[in-house]
Amino acid sequence: MGKREGNRERLFKAFRNESVDRVPAGFWFHFLSGGEFNSAVDNPALLEKNVAGHKQYIEAFHPDFVKIMSDGYFNYPRGQGKTYDSPESLAGIDVISADDPWVTQQVELVRRVAALQEDTAYFYNVFSPLNNLLFLAGRDQAFRFLAEKPEVCAKALDTIAAGLIVLAEEVIKKGGADGIYFSVTNPDAGKLPHPAYRRWVAPSELKVLEGAAAAGGRQILHICGFGGQHNDLQVFADYPVDAFNWATRLENVDLAEGKKIFHGKAVLGGFDNVPGSLLHWGSKEDIEAFTAKLLAAAGTTGVILGADCTVPADIDLARLEWVRRAGKPAA
């Protein structure tokens, strides 16, 4: 029997498509809810609640790696509360500084969570510039602005990106994060044609990824299907990240097919995360069988078992352990 690998070694070998002693697995939860998601700067108790949630989960499950949830600090603060009635008004968004409480508190969050379990890789959740613009200006209005004055919007996205780079640098260099879990979306329904996305939106996302890498971080790209939104995975196929995570059920693209789309790079996921799904309520035998099927198709190198997104708060951790134990040794 070969030497048992540590968590960090195992994960980073999976990133490099190297053989592992077992397939790593990772899942994550929200520890705040509703109006708390964006309220921690003015309510320090929410930072404590978030840390406590991570601590309880990590001590109970001992995950192979941890996605640190940015609950309480969801949205870019520079520009909140301002009125956006034209594309030009987006100039009211500015770059955030490293000493802003929105940054320093997140560094503190990361520092405290990353100290909870040794030999573990920690990735901090960061929402893309576009996701932040949709929040600041309003979803429908932001897409209208992008259609009317894409070059103006691109400047606003670059401004947000510069602030997110500051955040990424700080959580990596001072907070001890190993990198970022970068959440992107290119929504369907014709709101933003994919060529326009590549020209006007993708550059800002690539700047954040490059900034995080320059700070010494590794990156996981999360292509979010929140609310049932479909994404064109091909748009992100050449993004310079270590692993890709997407909504396998919603997109009807399993890990094996994703490996092909993303040029053989590491893939993360495989399980539907919605309430009532197999992971949430399925039997041990069914979950083990589904895991075996995933790995038979995708292989055991460059694969990390997990879910499409955040799992339900009431899920029994034993179910996640069934998945982890089903990660068979590499041949």
Image (cartoon, helix red, strand yellow):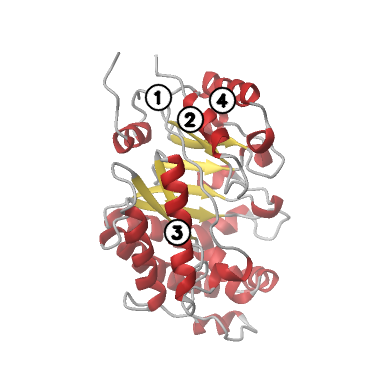
Q: Amino acid at mark 1?
A: Arg
In front of the other: label 3 or label 4? 3
Of marks 2 and 1, which one's residue comes earlier in the chain? 1
Q: Amino acid at mark 2?
A: Arg
Q: CA distance from mark 3 to mark 4?
A: 30 Å
- Of the 4 image quadrants, the one containing the N terminus is top left
Mark 3 falls on what kind of element? helix
State the image quarter where residue 61 is shown.
top left
Place of residue 238 in the rendered image (x, y in percent of width and height, measured from the top left) = 45, 44
Of marks 3 and 4, which one's residue comes earlier in the chain? 3
Residue on which disc 4 sits? 291
Of marks 3 and 1, which one's residue comes earlier in the chain? 1
Residue on which disc 2 sits? 324
Residue on which disc 3 sits? 52
Of marks 3 and 2, which one's residue comes earlier in the chain? 3
Q: CA distance from mark 2 to mark 4?
A: 9 Å
Q: Decide: few, some or many residues near mark 3? Use Cα within 10 Å; few <14, some 14-19, many ≥20.
A: some
Labels 2 and 1 touching (C-beta < 8 A):
yes
